[in-house]
Image (cartoon, rainbow, N blue to C red):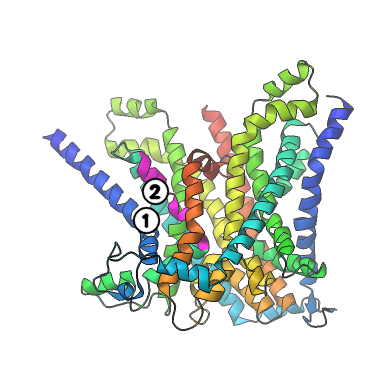
Amino acid sequence: MTRAIDWAGRALLTAATWILVAAVTFPLFWMLGTAFKKPAELFVKPPTFVPREPTLENFANVLTQTKFLTYASNSLTVAVVTTVFVLVVSTLGAHALVSFRLRGRTVVARALLLAYMLPTTAVLIPIYLMIAGFGLTNTLTGLIVAYSSLALPFALWMMRAFFVGIPPEIEAAATIDGASRLEAFFDVVLPQALPGIITTGVFTFLLCWNEYLYSLVMINDDSRRTLPTGIMGTLVTGHTIEWGMVMAAASMMSVPLLLIFLLLQRYVVQGFGAGAVKG
Amino acid sequence: MNQRDLGLGYLLLSPTVLLLCGLLGWPLIQAVLLSFYDMHPLTRKFVWVGLGNYEDLFQDDMFWRALGNNFIWLAGSLLLQIGGGVAIALLLNRSFPGRGLARSLILFPYLMPVLVAALVWQWMLHDLNGIVNYALTSLGFRRVDWLGAMPNAMVTVIVVGSWRVFPFVVIAVLARLQSIPQQLYEAAEIDGASRVARFWDVTVPQLANVLSVVVLLRAIWDFREFDLIFLMTGGGPVIGTTTLPLLVYKEAFELFKMGKALAIAVVMLGCMLVLIAAYLFTLRKASTSEEMQS
């Protein structure tokens, strides 16, 4: 009798779990479904979950009628350059902080944590003025500078957590075998740190790909906009919004990320907690 | 370690220190200094006004409303994402068919770009053609103006914001749940503790540390949230969902009152420093109590 109740209880909890998972992921499927619907089908009652006549019309319209590809290439350029730059600096910095007994390294580590938690809006205006002072508003270079200010503390803090996890003995063993500190870094430490570097890279890329505020403030020229400001500026203005096109654009902006995630799932899950909860 | 090695260490650290100073240290000092000036956007000339910007601010109803909104947004978001996150983490910690898949799917909201989240929800919450209002009306309820009226708009941004970030809570809690030693449960069972008693006596205390850290961390990030609120409501209806970060943007880039905007940013910074200090304190306490256990 109790066993039957136990079984029923477990089945109920499993059903509840799956209903919750379905509810939480519903917006993703609703976006994809809408993206493949013809305009008339958007307003059908009752709504259809799977498009009756799936069409690529919305995608074609986004690609031909808006500067989607220009925005995408701007976003990609800014995100890739920032990520590579930030990864190089933060790998060297994290290594120096963790495995050298440098004077003031605790001060730097504390400053880093503070920088990581600083509100963007507090430095938004000075950074905007600085970039304007260099004549870099309306340029991708200016965006790269601004995004670096966001991404660097984040990447450094995350990277530091990964470097702390590498046992110091392996570097010591390599130097005893006659390698210089620099050789030991490249031959022994870097391969060990690779998963951490990949994880940090994925999250830094995500940060830049998503960023909205700096792009909104600094870019006026339509052909220099990134995806978030570009899509907002062209598709979501005016009285009638073409929801099919909007959802197609949104899908094209997020599907690459979801694919990266599926490919690197192991790393991404590690990255959630790294440098944050573990401290 | 010899001097040459130390030299190499400083060399490797120098780009980090230079960039941190240039991209954050200096702008931060400037933010505080320039909040005592008035800047004309056309002439780009700075005029000393002392505490003028702050006086202006503290007499402005908008500022107090935004500050209040900021705390409503923060409290609502924390309650919902922590409550929901812990509940889902507990559900996902059990063994059930398809657990791996469920755990992957649950991460999607966190990985979707903010803009995409804002757009999908706007479409789902559309007055006339949204799926949510369709579901409500077909169940016999009246349609709801989700984003155009108060307090609906605030509730809506809180729900969507929490939907986006709760996976962070799930992952953190799930990691902690999996590291609770099974012996603790077995010992409690031998002592005759019921399932409910085991939850309160074993699971809850084990989660307490990680939860206090997660709550403060999320508080720090949510307090400064701009993108999602701005994209969903633009701060409206009227100023119903205008929080401090949105007010900074409006004053600086719509009304061109840079000095006043900076004064708001400095006040925000003060609030954040309190949260950050609490976070560091909790983190230290959590790590020492964990060392004592092990």
* Residue A116 in view, yes or no: no
| Residue B106 lies within the magenta run | yes
Region of the chain picked out in magenta, as a range:
B100-114
The residue under label 2 is B105
Please tell me in which quadrant of the rendered image residue B190 appears.
top left
Q: What residue type is labelled 1?
A: Val
Q: Residues within 10 Å of mark 2 (few under 14, many from 20)?
A: some
| Left or right for B192, reference B52 | left
Point out which mark residue A239 bears: none
Asked if the residue under mark 1 is in contact with the one under mark 2, i.e. CB atoms within 8 Å, the reply is yes
Relative to residue A123, is residue A2 depicted above or below? above
Q: In which quarter of the image is the C terminus of chain A?
A: top right
Of residue B133 and residue B74, the one placed in the foreground of this image is B133
Q: Residue at x 61, y 69 (%)?
A: B245
| Left or right for B116, reference A67 | left
Protein chain holding label 1? A
Point out which mark residue A24 bears: 1
Q: Residue B293: image x %, image y %?
A: 51, 29
Which mark is in front, 2 or 1? 2
Q: How far apart are marks 2 and 1 (CA)?
A: 9 Å
| Residue B201 lies within the magenta run | no
Protein chain holding label 2? B
Q: In which quarter of the image is the N terminus of chain A?
A: top left
Relative to residue A158, is residue B164 depicted above or below? below
Q: Which residue is drawn at 80% across and 56% down?
A: B22
Q: Residue A260: image x %, image y %?
A: 51, 47
Q: Is mark 2 on a helix, strand or loop?
A: helix
| Left or right for A31, reference B214 | left
Q: Residue at x 29, y 63 (%)?
A: A49
Q: Residues within 10 Å of mark 1 (few under 14, many from 20)?
A: some
Q: Residue B123: image x %, image y %?
A: 40, 71
Of residue B195 and residue A93, the one placed in the foreground of this image is A93
